[in-house]
Amino acid sequence: MTSFAQLLKEHALKATFQRMTILAVIEREGHLNVDEIYAQVLEAHPTLSLATVYKNIITMVERGVLVEVPILGHKSKYEIRKHEHVHLICHQCGAVMDQAIDDVLIEDTLTIAKQSAFALENRQVNLYGVCAGCQEGKASA
Ligand SMILES: [Zn+2]
Ligand SMILES: [Zn+2]
């Protein structure tokens, strides 16, 4: 189990109660949008505003604690940064699924960046489409 206080400290962030709660909520679910995070944070801290929660999320994205996953037609979801993986993202239901990524694929992106003299800072591999569940729904409709 990662200590959230430790994680925040490693990214030069104060381990506030709000941030610890946000991280605990995200870890429990994997990927959540700001509304989903806020709804669950409210259970522990009924007085927190959406603006405060959102500001904390953005700060943790900027410091690299959280990763923002953009979803076409839906609000972005946030996850705790962990070792690299591919996202399968359904633009119908907004589901985000993690899949392991091949080391070779990671190496390839480094080579591409290097060949273009591009100073790579961030990388996210997202595959967009329709999940199995939504495809079934469509077939029976
Ligand atoms: Zn779906
Ligand atoms: Zn993920």
Image: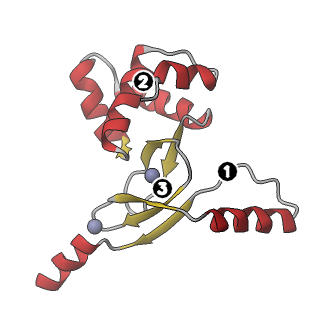
Picture layout, residue 120 above or below residue 55: below
- Residue 6 placed where, x, y %? 54, 20
Residue at image location 59% in from the left, 19% down from the top: 9
Q: Secondary structure at mark 1?
A: loop
Badge 3: residue crowd in 10 Å (few <14, some 14–19, many ≥20): some
Residue 54 left/right relative to 32 = right
Sooner in the amino-acid sequence: mark 1 or mark 3: 3
Q: Is residue 64 visible?
A: yes
Badge 2: residue crowd in 10 Å (few <14, some 14–19, many ≥20): few
Residue 80 left/right relative to 34 = right
Residue at image location 44% in from the left, 43% down from the top: 79
Sooner in the amino-acid sequence: mark 2 or mark 3: 2
Picture layout, residue 17 above or below residue 1: above
Which of discs 2 and 3 lies nearer the camera? The answer is 3
Kind of residue at badge 2: Thr
How far apart marks 1 and 3 lie (CA) works out to 14 Å
Question: For ligand 1, which image quadrant applies?
Answer: bottom left
Q: Which residue is mark 1?
A: 122
Q: Which residue is mark 2?
A: 52
Picture layout, residue 100 above or below residue 32: below
Kind of residue at badge 1: Asn
Q: Quadrant of the N terminus?
A: top left
